[in-house]
Image (cartoon, coloured by chain):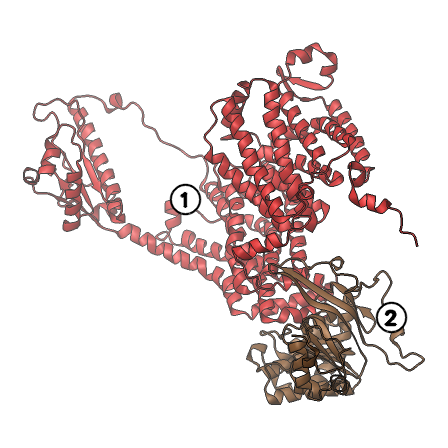
Chain colours: A red, B brown
Amino acid sequence: MNLKTIKLVYQRELRDQMRDRRTLFTVLVLPVLIYPLLGMAILHISQFSTVEPCRIWILGGQHIPHDSPLVAEGLFCSGLLSDSERRITVVELADPTMADVIAPLRKFMTSDDHALTPDLLHWAKQQMVNRRYDLAIFVPPVAGADGSSLASMNQIQIIQNSSRSTSVTAALRAQTAVQKWMQNLVVKNLGQLQIQVADVKPFSVSIADVADQASVSAVKWSKALPLIIVIWALTGAFYPAIDLCAGEKERGTLETLLSSPAPRSDIIGGKLLTVMTFSIVTAILNMVSLGISAGLLIGTSSNSNFLGQHFGITLPPLQVLPILLAALIPISALFSALAFAIAAFARSSKEGQYYLLPLMMLTFPLLMLPMLPGMHLSMGTCLIPVSGLIFLLHSIIEGDYGAAATFFGPVCAVTLICCGLALKWSARQFNDESILFRAADQISLRTWLKYWTSRRSLAPTMTQAILCALTILVAKFFGTFLVAPPRHWDEFCRQTVSLLFIAVTLPALVFAFATTHKQWKALRLRMPRPWTLALAGLMAIFLHPIFAGLTECVMWLYPMKGLAIPAEAMMSQLLDGAPGIWAVVLVLAIAPAICEELAFRGYILSGLRSSVGAVPAVLIASLFFSLAHSIVQQSIIAFFVGIVLAVWAIRTESIFPCIVFHAVHNSLTLLFVRIDPGLVAASSWLQTIVLIDDGKVSGYQPLATVLCGLVAIMLALILWRHRVEETLLVWSRSRRRKSPPIAG
Amino acid sequence: MDPVADGSDIPAETCGVADRSKPQLMTNSFSPDAAGRPLLMIHVRHLCKRYSDMNGDFVALDNVSFDVIPGQIYGLLGPNGAGKTTILRILCTVLKPTAGTALVNGFDVVEHPEQVRRQLGFVSTNTAIYDRMTGWEMVEYFGRLYGLAEDVLLGRLEMLFDRFKMNDIRNVLGSNMSTGMKQKVSIARALVHDPPVLVFDEATSGLDVVATREVLTTVEQLRDSGKCVVFSSHIMSEVRRMCDRIAILHRGRVVAEGNVGELADRFKQPDLEELFYQLIAYGTIVTETVATPLPNSGTP
């Protein structure tokens, strides 16, 4: 890398973007304008909300006691509403004889339960429209006034039209006024009966807040500010990235640059720095503009303090700004690299812009996670990309510096790893000439099918492998929701095996037959030597304590929550109904081992391996294997188990050792929790292996875990010492190599 | 869309793969030898390029070989899609060959791409100029990318802007220039580092008569000053006027190679346009061993 060249490219790109009106508007002008405009809109809305008058129509007003009036001079009585609201709430009493003329109304007034009939509602709606009332209030005769009992409560019925906002506003005001009026009436009646109010209502409930307004405001800002920064860092990166990659392709200047002696790494460096600069500047401008607009809206004029009055928001604490700026650098780096990689793929600016929405949609769950109630910075949440950083910012803005300091390291590590991966991806995209000079493909189902069937090869391609994996994930998703929860073991057994076969194995088999002409090779169905099967089984046994420890760590990081707990309880119940442990092992260990290995270590890994190196292939296949597990905690462990299985598959070119490993691992996991603690207590050698805590088998002894880990490493070394062909019973390539040279 | 197939897919008898394990910096080996043979500035052997996409495999170049010496204009003549641009993109290291070798002034395009790019200037319909940069800024920027010292760069800029009469568009943005002006800036950009090799890919495409004449004159002047020029075109008159040697390309293969006179003698067709048409229309498998006019060769 030559810093001088990077600087040259950076300066040019920066100047180029500064001369582009569209980019300038989107990235620099829009953020500056949007908040003042938003502020103006809020001011207008606040004016609307305070001046909106409404008209209320009371039917049966003659039934209101004369000594406790609700209405006076066309308005609610003084004291029932705030003065400003009272002045703009016109109340009219209907003609007292109306109830005699209108049949549905008469029925309402005279019936005991005062039920609203559809006829009455229809009539009321028509009247409200014709007479231009926002609200109607039906007041039935007071029960007991004519000598009947007071057993039933008098129902004052407010009729609103919730499809009209003025009607909803009127209903809220009327409800407040009527409740206040009823309260006064009760106090008056109690006074007449010489009963103290405290005897009827001994307590009243009110809430007091010890938090000062600044803290409350900080919590609200802690939710809003990181979100704003992330969204604008992404938007600010996206448009320049599209212009600098797809735009240059479209305008023909990219080839000019590529034919210069500047190395591609320097071009990528200069362009990425430009994208990052715009991302950072956009986010900063947003913060500044938001700060100034919010300051004006909240701080200066008391009349316009709409946000403060309605949402309890004050100015954001100034000390958080440096922290936000520091966090902005990794966020911008991450999104710049992602946007750059996508922009390198796009053929034109227009195509590039289509990719913004999917990128936003993929980012949104990570942005929304910290917004969920009850979520906070912990060892588990801090390891989630983007979300962890937002959680950290929340903690800092809220003043929880202890938690922030504890998780600062892991958050930084995760963020740096993500940035590194995104940068690597973007460099790869830019260096790949098949992507950089991608021509328009004629996409049609017919072409696809023809392409696939005519190009059946020994191994599937990466695209085919990923499509197969996605098909499996979608099939599993729908399969899980389509089947009803099993009621007993037999049903559970049928559902599990069917789902595994239909959603996991079948797609892999269909893909293998459709895209390859040596399916046994694509699915890695080569016969291994027996010792590899034994070695795989032994390794599963000796690695089990490590995975058990890992499971404990995962459970500590991400404890079971929500739906996972009842699901686990249901599973325990179902397993209890099994005819024997052999059945549990068959359904939950051996069946998944066969079905999942065919798909994940068979077809998918073969496809990935044909296009990328061993390490990315192993990681991607393991990621898909992990995603195929519905419970998060299970997915994390499956990822690591998947890595070991994929390594086995690559080292032996066969899935049979993987099936053995998978089946043994699953069986041990199922059997381990069923070990009788009494048996452990009685056996001294079992006590050296198994850990008993609170009368239950809770894990392996640390020493046993370490020793088992060492044995597992030795077993791995044994496998490593053998070439791939030595692990198989038949190896065509090796036989060819050994064939004697032709004489002459 | 799919990755380019690797060299192993190409039959050995069609595309020879060079041994790149040895250094290819062979400037001395191209020096005039004892027999007085001239230095080879461009040396292409068995060049192949294959793409693979939804519509199947596509052979863009199939076993292309040719040499160009300094002070020579070498013409690549072929219809659209014949593979001219692919050859030139490989020479400029923008694309990598699937098989075969290409050396520019002794530097291998795969092993030493940056050195190769320093040896040549590339003008193509695909190498546009920046819309939001002035003519001066554009040429200056590329001069800096080539690592020219400030005083040298300033001298080159003044010389080029005077030579191509571009002083009135010094401060005009690319977006406000005419096609002819843009092409002038492109040529100045390609010449800013005074390279020994120049590549012109359909350089007169879309230009008016005056601008075309200016470009052609410039190319001739460059040849006369000892530069090695590769000139691709599908316009017969340009090729006839400019090129010292011609390779006629069709569907990625060189179907004929030589100077205009040699080709006319070999195919007994003095009209270059007619010769070209016959080769393209009937000669998908015609080789240089065919000594009779092509319509009589019996190929449909």
**In the rendered image, is residue A379 in sight?**
no
Quadrant in the picture for residue A679:
top right
Location of residue A450 in the rendering, given as x and y in whole percent from the top left corner: 57, 55
Quadrant into which the N terminus of chain B falls: bottom right
Residue drawn at the location 60% of the way across and 60% of the way down: B55
| Residue type, numbered disc 2 | Met
Q: In this view, does B54 lie above or below A386?
A: below
Q: Nearer the viewer, mark 1 or mark 2?
A: 2
Location of residue A706 in the rendering, given as x and y in whole percent from the top left corner: 76, 27
Residue drawn at the location 75% of the way across and 84% of the way down: B263
Report in which chain the residue with disc 2 lies: B
**In the rendered image, is residue A541 in sight?**
yes
Q: What element carries label 1?
A: loop
Q: Is residue A160 above or below residue A578?
A: below
Q: Is residue A325 left or right of residue B242?
A: left
Which residue in the protein does label 2 denote? B26
Residue drawn at the location 61% of the way across and 75% of the way down: B133
Location of residue B141 in the rendering, given as x and y in whole percent from the top left corner: 68, 73
Compare residues A548 and B85 and report the one nearer the observer: B85
Q: Which label sits on residue A312?
A: 1
Report in which chain the residue with disc 1 lies: A
